[in-house]
Image (cartoon, grey):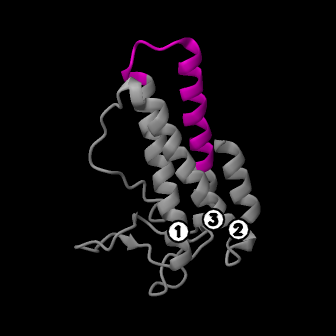
């Protein structure tokens, strides 16, 4: 906006959104609207799983071509799902305390990522994906969110 004062964003999305209340809030937007928090948590979880899958894909050399293909397609599907969740977030208010600012993804992660042993990889990745699908279904079926049901169904079909 400094470079082009005439610029008008399509949606007034939060700059530097955060999911947890920051100790120092200068320069951040705490997303605490009840609806937005649900989507933000889901989007961050999808992002974490996508990175986990990419880590598995590129850190383990002894994979069949088919196994590499499955992991690549899974990561790509999650990328599309994250984009769809981000689009939903950009239409939801960020916080009741800051009217006129919409939410956005924060890409919050756990601190450590280490590869999963191949012997338990399939079980752990499948378990996490099923948890995300259950969360999507819960959001889709919640009567408070009927306007986003179609978007969530597209997300779910993308990552199944």
Number of numbered discs on residues: 3
Please state which of the two labelled residues, at mark 2 or mark 1, is closer to the viewer: 2
Q: Main secondary structure of the magenta part?
A: helix
Q: Which residue is mark 3?
A: 138
Q: Residue at x 66, y 42 (%)?
A: 160
Residue at the image position 49 percent from the left and 40 percent from the top: 50
Tell me which numbered mark, 3 or 1, is placed earlier along the sequence: 1
For the point 54% across and 28% down, the residue is 71
Report the residue marked by disc 2.
Answer: 141
- Residue range of the region highlighted in magenta in the rendering: 58-81
When the figure is inspected, residue 78 is found, relative to residue 71, above or below; the finding is: below
Query: Are there few (<14), some (14-19), or many (20+) residues within 10 Å of tag 2?
Result: some
Whether residues under marks 2 and 3 lie with C-beta atoms below 8 angstroms apart, the answer is yes
Point out residue 154 in the picture as x, y percentages from the top left corner.
73, 51
In the figure, 137 relative to 51: above or below? below
Q: Name the residue that disc number 1 marks.
A: 38
What's the mark number on residue 6?
none
Displayed quadrant of residue 17: bottom left
* Pointer 3 with pointer 1, Cβ within 8 A: no
Look at the image and tell me whether residue 10 can be seen: no
């Amino acid at each position: 906006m400094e470079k082009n004062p005439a610029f008008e964003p399509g949606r007034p999305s939060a700059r530097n959104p955060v999911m947890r209340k920051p100790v120092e809030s200068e320069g951040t937007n705490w997303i605490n609207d009840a609806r937005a928090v649900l989507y933000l948590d889901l989007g961050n979880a999808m992002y974490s799983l996508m990175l986990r899958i990419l880590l598995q894909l590129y850190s383990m050399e002894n994979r069949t071509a088919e196994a590499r293909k499955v992991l690549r397609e899974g990561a790509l599907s999650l990328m599309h799902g994250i984009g769809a969740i981000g689009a939903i977030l950009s239409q939801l208010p960020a916080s009741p305390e800051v009217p006129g600012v919409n939410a956005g993804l924060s890409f919050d992660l756990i601190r450590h990522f280490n590869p999963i042993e191949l012997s338990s990889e399939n079980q752990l990745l499948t378990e996490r994906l099923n948890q995300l699908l259950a969360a999507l279904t819960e959001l889709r079926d919640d009567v408070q969110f009927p306007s986003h049901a179609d978007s969530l169904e597209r997300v779910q079909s993308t990552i199944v």
